[in-house]
Image (tube, coloured by chain):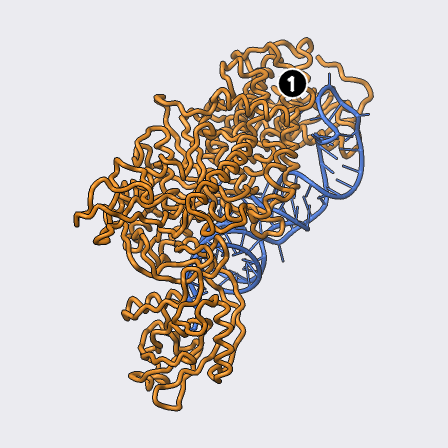
Chain colours: A orange, B blue
Amino acid sequence: MLEKKYNFSINEKKWQDYWFENDIYKFEEGSNKKVYSIDTPPPTVNGKIHMGHLSSYMHIETVARHHRMLGENVYFPFGFDDNGLPTERYVEKVIKKKAYELPRETFVNICLDETKKLEDEFFDLYKSAGFSCNLKTHYSSIAPRTQKISQHSFLELYKKGKIYHAEAPALWCTECRTACAQSELEDKDIESTFNYLKFYISGTDEYVVVATTRPEMLCGVVCVFINPNDEKNKHLLNKKLIVPHFGFEVEVLTDELVDLEKGSGIVMCCTFGDNVDKEWQRKHNLPIKECFTADGKMTALAKEFEGMSILGCRKCVLDKLKEEDLLIKQESITHAVSTHDRCGTPIEIAVKKQWFIDVLSHKDELYKAGMDCNWYPKTMRARYLNWVENLSWNWCISRQRYFGIPFPVWFCKNCGKLKMAEAEDLPVDPLKDMPKTPCECGCNEFVGETDVMDTWATSSLTPQISTDMRTGLGLDDTMIPMNLRPNAHDNIRVWDFYTIVKSLYHFNKLPWSDLMISGYVTSPDGSKLAKSKANSANSPQDIIKTYSADVTRYWANNMTLGKDTAFSLVEFDNGKKLVNKLWNASKFVLSFLEGYTPKECELEIMDKWLIEKYKDLHDRYMKYLAKYEIALALNELEKFFWSFCDNYVELVKRRLYNPDVYGEGACESAKYACYHVLLGMLKMFSPVIPHITEEIYMSYFAELEGKKSIHISRYLDLGNDIDKDLIAKGDKVLDIVALVRQFKSENKVSLKTFIEDITITSEINDFIKLAEVDIKAVSSAYEIKYNDGEFNVVVGKVVEEEPITE
RNA sequence: GGAAGUUUAGCUCAGUUGGUAGAGCAUCUGCCUUACAAGCAGGCGGUCAUAGGUUCGAGUCCUAUAACUUCCACCA
């Protein structure tokens, strides 16, 4: 028997431990069931998890549990993304020191310690949310086995000519002192000034006006551009201009990209101030002048400003220009500047030796791959395609950092030639290990590559990393394509894109067939939820503690797929009510089922009706979930459940209470319907609210079904042959009951008040007569009278005494 | 500048392939009914952003407009 009140804090813990200890969710090796594999997002280990992350995982959870109950063998791995810049920045904050202030090895060791601590915290949270992924054996993106796969991928793609090492312009963060990728850019509105400067024409007293937002880059000007159709300025061609203050001369060149309308129509080009400069440098083969160092200090080119920060130098140069009467005017502007998403520092372009994966020459294939994947919701495909179309940089995978997977590469001390590691020796650390064979030039001494890989170079291999946990096959396509990649929409251009790149290049296959894209949880005012706010009162830990994991999961699963939702605690109340109602309804129904074993019997008409309604619900529920529309499936189920409580149970409870009055057969029939429909509903609720459904299931159904958990049982499928006619007629009976209730409500009497008679006019009286006993019981009526005709119900007089049944 | 999304009851949102506008919350009126007052019954409340179009019929399809949101590009 179920207790009077359900205590979630005791029960949730109880079942979490039970599931964990009994390996309820384990992947069944050697089973011949259909496999359903999920490429679980490994959380980035760089701080706290907020409600947005949690809700996204709760969607994945529901899908995993759903497929398990469809009878599939669900591969639901788990891992941590615990290397790379995000982790380094987290650690730098914790220890209040920059990575470069410590010896490399010391810093890496601190990273390993700190991530371990955080991972324990994450682990507890995942468990307390009732997650059914494999928490026992998880992968880590810094672990040796992962390093091996990642380095192997590097070697393979290098062999295939997809990776190249080149001194080329790359996006550079002066704060993190590393190169980064296009996907790490984030626009930020920054206040600045547009400065109109005098460029004198060499050998004359005339000058032209050139506008710039970056006067500190004057020392790096390599030429000046005008539009080839610029009549006003064409006299400048073949003349030289003098760069203000710095005094050196530059040529005037033409290019279509120059906007005639902007500024004076004359643009200075430095290498590199922005993307266009990068284009021009390549196109016109311009010299490269480095104005600043890796950490954002001006170089000797800046003359007296050497050593200053970029912004400091800007200010001093402007002062100087004013002093020398070279600054005509300044306009205040706010413009969008590309910044580094990890630290918010404006991104520069710097030339360094970097490792790149070629993506620009495969745009077409990458575009097609996006077309071939199934995106849920469909509109998310556009974001991917939009990103691929706008790609303008090859994927720079090298980072001048420390806590990452090293490149398995050395350089010969003698000839400087690259030396790649052998696949069988992986993983290698080129700073500790040495190649086993000499260089082609005969030299035996090497210098290891100090750069490390971008974290996405590794996490783009999660299909292989998680497969490897099972098979130990490393870089292998045994489980490719996986069934599902779930993540939030911010990761489309990053993780999803890079994973497609790797899978296409390695195996010429899509990494997965389906993508399920979650929306964001925003603050109540609609702004982004920041990780920094995760410690507030609404931390996942606190929410789960206060509202239970089930209610939190209910909340998360009510979000429409792909749509951002403002976080609101009010929404949790519905979940609380549902859980409470489910408990009470189950308690009530089970009180009649004690000792009952289901067996076929002659069914009363309204019991048949309920079964048909259930089949209809089951059908719609499955169709929605097949499209990952969890919220809609849940909504259908809830509507059915509340109607089951308020209508069906009310209709049959007297039959259940009084078999002596209504007959054993009528009671059996109600029990049959109650048993199946309650069980079926519990199963359908269980992916979303796994704890309370388990508690109810285990108290009664588990033994009869011979299962050790509801979560490894199958859904209750009562067939697809739905009798729509019976459903419509039964619904008419509910209409009659509703009209009687309305009558009593309008007359302000209790629903149990007895009435003399009900006169029903309808065209389906033969059917209604079959339900007469139930109608009489629920409406406390003495007598039902029938007329043929258009549907109408007339309720008779209220009477004082109890009607005599039979 | 390009793309996507949103606009439905006071609030938060559902609304499958076109067929009489839905739920929860809020509010109001009742009801302690042998599971549940964290409940039950009932009521009030909507020119479905605007303007056109297709259709026997449009919240749903098409075209334009407006407002808001997001992504991308621009960054001289």
Q: Quadrant of the C terminus of chain A?
A: top right
Where is residue A120 drawn, in percent x and y? 52, 34
Please give the residue where the numbered disc 1 appears in the rendered image. A2
Q: Residue at x 55, y 27 (%)?
A: A690
Q: Residue at x 35, y 49 (%)?
A: A450
Q: Which residue occupies the foreground of this view, A565 or A751?
A: A565
Q: Which residue occupies the foreground of this view, A685 or B31?
A: A685
Q: Amino acid at mark 1?
A: Leu
Placement of A226 over or under A437, stated as above or below: below
Dot 1 alpha-carbon crowd within 10 angstroms: few under 14, some 14 to 19, many 20 or more: some
Where is residue A222 drawn, in percent x and y? 34, 74
Q: Residue at x 28, y 45 (%)?
A: A505
Placement of A69 over or under A121, stated as above or below: above
In the current view of this chain or complex, which residue is farthest to the bottom? Answer: A205
Protein chain holding label 1: A
Q: Is residue A427 left or right of residue A98?
A: left
